[in-house]
Image (cartoon, rainbow, N blue to C red):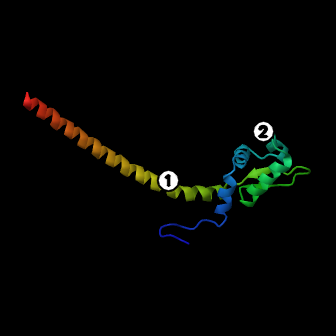
Amino acid sequence: MEQSGYTLEPQHLDAVFAALADPTRRAILSRLASGEASVNELAEPFEMSQPAVSKHLKVLERAGLVERDIDRQRRPARLKAEPMAAAVRWLEEFQRFWTSSFDELDGLLQELKDAGMKDAERKDAAQKNQK
């Protein structure tokens, strides 16, 4: 289903957001942003087993956020930016909406403030005239 003014993103956008919904997977991605790491290295800060971290990595791989190489006995994981960029583009549509909405709200608040100041000035003038 396509709405007017919107472009369709890759089909795996749902998988990207599902992968990002878990705080452990977000932490893994944050760690991988500083460079590739093995499962052992990724498991260190968590109170979970290496197989549990491997399951998280598989979810991230299916979403296209991580790729893994075979390097002798290690299988280092590396961050992939392209799927994240698709998610960011999708979210930017809403950023434009919120920015526009906040700008409209700012304008309305300024009008109310200006009207309130004019009312206060009229009241001050009326009080001076009564004296």
Amino acid type of disc 1?
Gln
Q: Residue 1 location, x and y as percent?
A: 56, 72
- Does residue 8 appear left or right of residue 27 in this picture? left
Q: Classify residue 17 by image quadrant.
A: bottom right
The answer to whether residue 5 is above or below residue 70 is below
The residue that appears at 33% across and 48% down in the rendered structure is 107
Q: Residue 20 location, x and y as percent?
A: 67, 52
Label 2 crowd bin: few (<14), some (14–19), many (20+), radius 10 Å:
few
The answer to whether residue 131 is above or below residue 82 is above
In three-dimensional space, the C-alpha distance between marks 1 and 2, rounded to whole angstroms, equals 33 Å
Name the residue tied to disc 2: 45
Q: What residue occupies the far front of the structure in this picture?
A: 130
Q: Classify residue 129 by image quadrant.
A: top left
Label 1 crowd bin: few (<14), some (14–19), many (20+), radius 10 Å:
few
What label sits on residue 95 in the rendered view? 1
Q: Classify residue 41 by image quadrant.
A: top right
- Does residue 70 appear left or right of residue 20 in this picture? right
| SS for dot 1 | helix
The residue that appears at 79% across and 44% down in the rendered structure is 42
The residue that appears at 16% across and 32% down in the rendered structure is 124
Q: Residue 120 location, x and y as percent?
A: 20, 36
Q: Residue 82 location, x and y as percent?
A: 66, 58
Q: Earlier in the sequence, mark 1 or mark 2?
A: 2
Instruction: Give whichever of 36, 87 is nearer the camera.
Output: 87
The answer to whether residue 37 is above or below residue 120 is below
Instruction: Give whichever of 100, 52 is nearer the camera.
Output: 52
The residue that appears at 24% across and 43% down in the rendered structure is 115
